[in-house]
Amino acid sequence: MSGGAGRVAGTDGMGGGAEGRALGAGALSGGADRTSGTGGVSGEVGPAPGTGGAPGGELPSVPGVLGVVGLGAVGCALVRRAALAGYDVVVLDPHPDAAARLDGLVQDTVPTGRLRLTDDWAAFASADVVVEAVPERREAKTEVLRALDRVCPPATVLATTASALSLTDLATACGRPGRVVGLHLALPTAEVAEVGRTVVADAEAVEWVRDLARDLGLDPVTVGDRAGLVSASLLFGYLNHAVALYDQGVVARDDIDAAMRYGCGLPLGPLELLDVIGADTACDVLAALADRLDEPSLQPARRLRHMALAGLLGRKTGRGFYAYPAPPAGAGTDAGPDVLRPLPVTRAGVVGTGTMAAGIAEVLARNGITTLLVGRSDERAKSAWEAVAASTGRAVRRGRMTEAEQSALLGRLEPGSDLGRLAGCDLVVEAVAEDLAVKKPLFARLGALCGPDTLLATTTSSLPVIECGLASGRPRDVVGLHFFNPAPVMKLVEVIPSLETAPHHLATARELCRRIGKHPVQCLDRPGFVVNALLFPYLNGAVRLAESHYASADAIDQVMKGGCGFPLGPFELLDVIGLDVSLSIQQVLHTADRRPASAPAPLLGHLVAAGRVGRKAGAGFRVYG
């Protein structure tokens, strides 16, 4: 083995085969180099003029030579970007299909740079920057970095894709601490690169890696050496929590993914995303995070560990939480049979006059259901009716509804303040303040005045459905229907039966969701249900990250949107939800588990106390208007 690197892993664990393959002496002794590119097989890749790690030099004005060790998913993404950007790329990966994988990266396009697969560490001596993209294990990464240190000139910058491991530890272990910089892509499809800077890194080396990221079409965000950087510290706890909920039987596999796609607008659900990342990579990252942060909840969930051991790694092995290449079973469909035939719903009531109440009333009336909109006063109820009129008026102007359809919808919507009118309804939906002190007296009144077959629903997002049921005196008739805001647009509804909910009422609730064009996801009556149980710890973690001054709110939002594909960054989303609402939900979650990590971030409470509760107040984490 050139340079005596010992045994090191050959992929980054996010694609391309099983975990723990090694670059052994037999695989790397002697051997020919294989080069592909615009001209097919070509000669050696030499250093571009002015490159090759000249001491004190700057990155060349034209792309030079980039080295990459490991052709997992992230390694492949970097190689493809570099070849298209005009770099000559030297690649080392001992896997038997590495050559085919390398050719496959550029089949649909013509790279301007050359690709060369080598088994000789000395080939990296001509590179300006070498990126190691092997699994998130200290022994694998240090062996690669030490091998590169032995063959590369002193000025060559070594970049590591590590996210959970200590960059400072890796830098000092390899022998050139000043020239080791982090280059982390949260996903192979990321548009943002986190550039990890240690306290001992040369400023010039950091700038080289930032320039490289820009050349590759990535937006660089410079961060310090912290466990998980930004993306991994927020993303993997959320993913692990999702696996735990699935493993505990809280929610079905398809439903947990549908909940996060339809409820939060994410491109992939957490289990789908884990199949992209790979169970082995996820276990490596989580174990490193748990160790560095001394946080037991970050230890890989049991099912995730067992999947990694069984080789059920996700897309790269053809089977993970789902089977591939077939699409996820039940994707976009409702999972789980109804137990009994649902009851018909022709007349409904909505109690409340806020944004959610008006939105739910609009959805019901739009789907042919006569709907009573009941407020504390006729004026409030009329105001909610006018909000629906304004919303549907916008739909008419945008061509999504005709004037005749709007007129018919508004004709089915009857505002007023008399609760007694609800007695003849098939369904009554409570949409008042998220406070049991407000909800329980209302359910007591509804239980007394509504007919024996009326289904009573609470829109709570985090409170126990059973408490509303017991307050009504008829818990068999009460179910949770958690709509998402804005209700006319968001497709998801979480359906939450309590331990007492009658099966035919559960069937009625599920069928109603289908009828009004929503996707029902059934889950247990537990704090946060599915979406909030996963979403708000992630949001709370983002606030803690910002209040520690590790990264700004703008930088965190940028990484989560560009790096992980989230439609909104956590601080943008908090300002939309409302910081007061977010604080209340996080307090409920913390009361349930009493873990220090789930306690609301102090900064969140401070902003709420100052009246900065988000967009609705004109200021939250950002100032609006």
Image (spheres, rainbow, N blue to C red):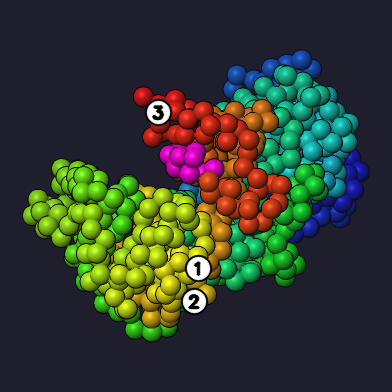
- Disc 2 marks which amino acid? Glu
Q: Which mark is residue 466?
A: 1
Question: Residue sitting at 38 percent across and 53 percent down?
Answer: 432
Q: CA distance from mark 1 to mark 2?
A: 7 Å
Cα distance in 3D space between marks 3 and 2: 42 Å
Label 3: element kind: loop
Q: Nearer the viewer, residue 454 or 131?
A: 454
Residue tagged 2: 500
At 20% across and 54% down in the image, what residue appears?
416
Between discs 3 and 1, the one toward the N terminus: 1
Nearer-N-terminus badge (1/2): 1
Spot occupied by residue 516 in the image (x, y as percentages of width and height): 28, 64
Q: Residue furthest top?
A: 56
Q: Position of residue 559 (x, y in %)?
A: 57, 36
Q: Nearer the viewer, mark 3 or mark 1?
A: 1
Residue in the image at 78% along x and 35% along y: 167
Relative to 101, does residue 560 appear above or below in the rendering?
above
Range of residues picked out in magenta? 573-583
Q: Is residue 215 visible?
A: no
Residue at the disc numbered 3: 618
Q: Residues within 10 Å of mark 2 (few under 14, many from 20)?
A: some
**Quick check: is 289 in the magenta stretch?**
no
Q: Nearer the viewer, residue 590 or 220?
A: 590
CA distance separating discs 3 and 1: 36 Å
- Camera-near label (3 vs 2) is 2
Q: Nearer the viewer, residue 211 or 444?
A: 444
Instruction: Compare marks 3 and 2 and give the one earlier in the sequence.
Output: 2
Does the magenta-highlighted stretch encompass residue 575? yes
Q: Give the residue type that dot 3 points to.
A: Gly
Circles 1 and 2: CB distance less than 8 Å? yes
